[in-house]
Amino acid sequence: QAHLGASASWNQQGAISDLASARICLGMAVERLQHRRRPCRIASASLLLGGAAVAFWAVPHAFLTSWRPTAPQASGSSPAASRRGLLAATLGSAAALAPGVGPALADRPPDSVVVSGRTGERKEINGRWSIVFGKKLNNKVVYKKDGYQFYLMYNDCGQYQMGEAVKGTCDGFGLNNKGVWSFDGVADPEVKVRPAGAKEDKMPVVKQEDLEKLSKAIQREQNIMMLETEVNTFMGNMEDDADAAAQRLMDKMGAKIVKGM
């Protein structure tokens, strides 16, 4: 058990370290772009890596449980290989940002839920409902309103209902039909039932057009990196001013480019 605890702690520290590294890369990229530099396209790729940070904050538990320590890279790894690794991380982050993508629902039901949105008659249902341990109905857990004899259960008709007793008959004072609650026969779409502690605001959804722009930007980076792996020199692959500065320095030093270097 001590070994497992130490391993879990080490995994979490590694994930936090990865997030810190991603944020540092993003800051360096912004600073370089402000000075109109483009060192081997790392800045652009690092900006895309910002999506990785968004994905991490959106699904923190999924990130920590899926992270695994990897073997250290050899000291002789090429810059192109590093860029490819950076781009691969960005591609994974883009997938995590796609609409509808998120951590799987937990198998274990929440210990409590919160009802909100009810006004007027039966407004007492608003608030926390705690699980009734050891009690199930139709293979679903039962919740009880704190301080009241109200129960939330799954009835024999395949619906969630609220009632004053735990029973399967479909005659509760509150019935949920296709996501909309009705009380005493009157629909009230304002009533919501959420796990306790869940944010009421929905996570921002990435628009399809933004995903398409991100995909095109990634494709451009892939094409540029492919060209960089096919050339034998850095000359001619930088900004014009950087190329000119490099040539002046080489002329001053009397240096020449050797084939294959």
Image (cartoon, rainbow, N blue to C red):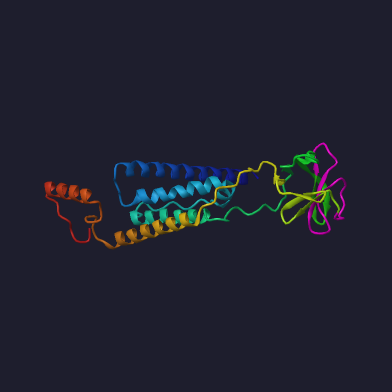
Q: Main secondary structure of the magenta part?
A: loop
Q: As drawn, is 221 to the left or to the right of 171?
A: left
In the rendered structure, does residue 164 fall within the stretch colored magenta?
yes
In the rendered structure, does residue 135 fall within the stretch colored magenta?
no
Horizontal and vertical percent for residue 104?
Answer: 63, 54
The image shows residue 31, relative to residue 224, as above or below, that is: above
**Camera-side residue of 146 and 28:** 146
Horizontal and vertical percent for residue 12?
Answer: 55, 44
| Quadrant location of the N terminus in the rendered image | top right
Q: Residue at x 86, y 49 (%)?
A: 166
The answer to whether any part of residue 225 appears in the image is yes
The answer to whether any part of residue 78 appears in the image is no
Q: As drawn, is 223 to the left or to the right of 242?
A: right
Furthest-bottom residue in this view: 230
| Quadrant location of the C terminus in the rendered image | bottom left
The image shows residue 215, relative to residue 146, as above or below, that is: below
Q: Residue at x 52, y 54 (%)?
A: 96
Q: As drawn, is 253 to the left or to the right of 81?
A: left
Q: Residue at x 82, y 57 (%)?
A: 138
Count of picture labels: 0
First to last magenta residue range: 144-170
Horizontal and vertical percent for residue 49?
Answer: 43, 49
Q: Residue at x 51, y 50 (%)?
A: 69
Horizontal and vertical percent for residue 11?
Answer: 55, 46
